[in-house]
Amino acid sequence: MTDYFHLDASPGQIQAISTLGLAHLGDGVFELMVRSWLCLHGKATSKGLHRAAVRYVAAPAQARAAERLLPLLGEEEGDVFRRGRNTSPHSVPQNASRADYQAATGLEALFGWLWLQGRTERLNELFAVVMEEEECR
């Protein structure tokens, strides 16, 4: 039985997944991390949890997060981010610019790629950088 909480996919398995597939998975990983962070830090009431989560997972917020992370990425991580960012979106949400949406897709692809490798420690490191400004609020 596959343990979907502790993945360690082979490089071949990961290579077979499209960039949009990585971004789709990474979107879920990032949102789960945001939701966990919100609950653990008491940042929102039960009524406002969804609204609070959306504030962090919307494309403009993810684009700002990507800017903070880019200098910290290794070569391979940067390649995955750029591959995700350079994917042509079929549509762009109204609340985001095309550039923000593409940067968000890059961030999501990176998070999906790391998740598939079981690199949760690295995910936590990057997520901590994204959320460190929020710790002060």
Image (cartoon, rainbow, N blue to C red):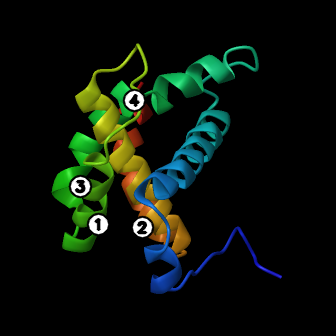
Q: 54 left or right of 136?
A: right
Answer yes or no: is residue 105 visible: yes
The extreme right residue here reads 1
Q: Badge 3 is on which residue?
A: 82
Taking the spot 55% from the left edge, 75% from the top edge, the residue there is 118
Look at discs 3 and 2 and give the one toward the viewer.
3
Q: How far apart are labels 1 and 4 at the CA level? A: 20 Å
- The image position of residue 137, as x and y in percent, is 42, 24
- Residue 122: assigned label: 2
Is the residue 137 above or below the residue 48 in the image? below
- The reply to whether callout 3 and callout 2 are in contact (CB within 8 Å) is no
- The reply to whether callout 1 and callout 3 are in contact (CB within 8 Å) is no
Taking the spot 74% from the left edge, 14% from the top edge, the residue there is 47
Q: Amino acid at mark 4?
A: Ala
Look at discs 4 and 2 and give the one toward the viewer.
4
- Which SS class for mark 1? helix
- The image position of residue 24, as x and y in percent, is 54, 49
Q: Badge 1 is on which residue?
A: 77
Q: Amino acid at mark 3?
A: Arg
Q: Badge 4 is on which residue?
A: 59
Q: How far apart are labels 3 and 2 at the CA level? A: 18 Å
Q: Amino acid at mark 2?
A: Arg
Is the residue 50 above or below the residue 27 in the image? above
Does label 1 or label 3 sit earlier along the sequence? 1
Dot 2, how many residues are within 10 Å of its Cα: few (below 14), some (14-19), or many (20+)? few
Q: How far apart are labels 2 and 1 at the CA level? A: 11 Å
- The reply to whether callout 3 and callout 4 are in contact (CB within 8 Å) is no
Does label 1 or label 4 sit earlier along the sequence? 4
- Which SS class for mark 4? helix
Look at discs 2 and 1 and give the one toward the viewer.
1
